[in-house]
Image (cartoon, rainbow, N blue to C red):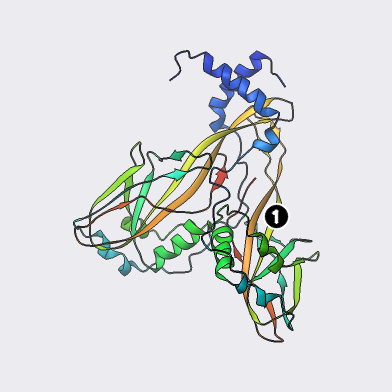
Amino acid sequence: MNPNPFCRPILCALAACILSSCADAAWQEYLFPHNVRRQVAFDESAFTGSLRSGSGVVRGQVFLDMKDGTRFTPANSKVSMVPVTAYTTEMVQRKFVRGVYLAKPDPRYFKYVRVTQTDRNGNFIFRGLPPGHYYVGTKITFLADDSYDDADNNFQELYDNHSCRAYAEASVKAGQAVTITDWNVGPERVP
Amino acid sequence: MSLPITRVFGLLTASALLSSCGEAINEALFPHNLPHHVAFDEAAFTGTLRSGTGVVQGQLAANFRDGTTYYPPDTKVGLVPVNAYTSEIIQRKYINGAYLAKPDPRYAKYVRIAVTDDQGRFSFSKVPPGEYYVGSKVSYTTTWTYTDDNGFSETEPETHIWRDYARITLQPGQKITITDWSTGPERITNP
């Protein structure tokens, strides 16, 4: 307890002045640990096969159903594809499903990630895939109107990016075209 | 940026009243009231209300990224039998952060409730043997400070919310102490 009741509010006020200069960067920081260590070691041999060229196709549309009944289909959004391995399963289970702030992957990981972009309707396609079992993943970012009335009852206009991660699994046989119609959506993040 | 001193004291008073004004900021856009996939089967619950000789105790704890540990006080902890209905709640609501619809009205009477003390500790006694989930919704309030459209520094409360659960198997007369929790995604809201 502070012995001088008048000391504390002034300190608070001073702190608030200092904080306000960097408010944009500092607001709403998550409390949970970042750079959480992975439990599965990176085993490169589990990935090498996936870079071969094949005749399989995986396509689909990225979409997100909102509570107001609208469906958001992100344009020009990055979609990634990786083989199902112990390493990628940990990533999907912890980072995508549970929202853990996992540490960056092993640097060798990136060369085994196929990447494409959605068109303006959220559609994407991966061609030339060898047969196998894959995860398709994406981070969906959507602008939300988070305007509110502040402590003095003044309206504050605020638009924020909310985001979430979504993934799907696809088993591709030689020459087969698989269409993804459903996504497993992880927790919604507010900045 | 510095504020005139009268303004600062005005702010401090206003912040005390904050909870009475201001509309929701950062409202989650994901669908709410998602229907349960599993139907409520009352027969899977009835055994758990018998009186037994087991004890389930433990301590809620959260390790924050700044290295501190928080032991949530005055927080409800629930104990329910493991069955298809509760497993869905754990998987979707606790782990994946889905906004699941309220449970069947009959569900509540099969939930044993304990409340943590000031060190996050709780205890259930006279529990019959069986498999159980122990779960809790935890919240932690911080403040964030920003500059509003008029150039004034504002401070608002910010509540972080997450769910913890553990799964245990209790033998007759056994005492189990839970200190290890599976933690779901962290959410930030303004009350």
> To which quarter of the image does residue B17 belong?
top right
- Can you give x and y, in whole percent of width and height, for residue B20 in the image? 54, 32
- Residue at position x 58%, y 16% from top? A10
Q: Confirm whether residue B101 shows in the render.
A: no
The kind of residue tagged 1 is Thr
Q: Residue at x 20, y 61 (%)?
A: B172
- A39 with respect to A13 (left or right): left
Residue behind mark 1:
A141
Q: Quadrant of the N terminus of chain B?
A: top right
Q: Residue at x 50, y 61 (%)?
A: B92
Picture coordinates of residue A174, whole percent (x, y): 69, 86
**Horizontal arrangement in the rendering, residue B141 relative to residue A157 (left or right):** left
> Residue B14's spot in the image, x, y percent?
58, 24
Toward the viewer: B4 or B49? B4
Which residue sits furthest bottom? A175
Res B130 quadrant in image: bottom left
Dot 1 crowding, Cα within 10 Å, few <14, some 14–19, many 20+: some
Q: Is the residue B12 above or below the residue B181 in the image? A: above
Q: Specify whether residue A154 is in view.
A: yes
In this rendering, would A135 be left or right of A1? right
Identify the image quadrant of residue A70. bottom right
Q: Position of residue A159 (x, y in %)?
A: 72, 44
The kind of secondary structure element at disc 1 is strand
Q: How many marks?
A: 1
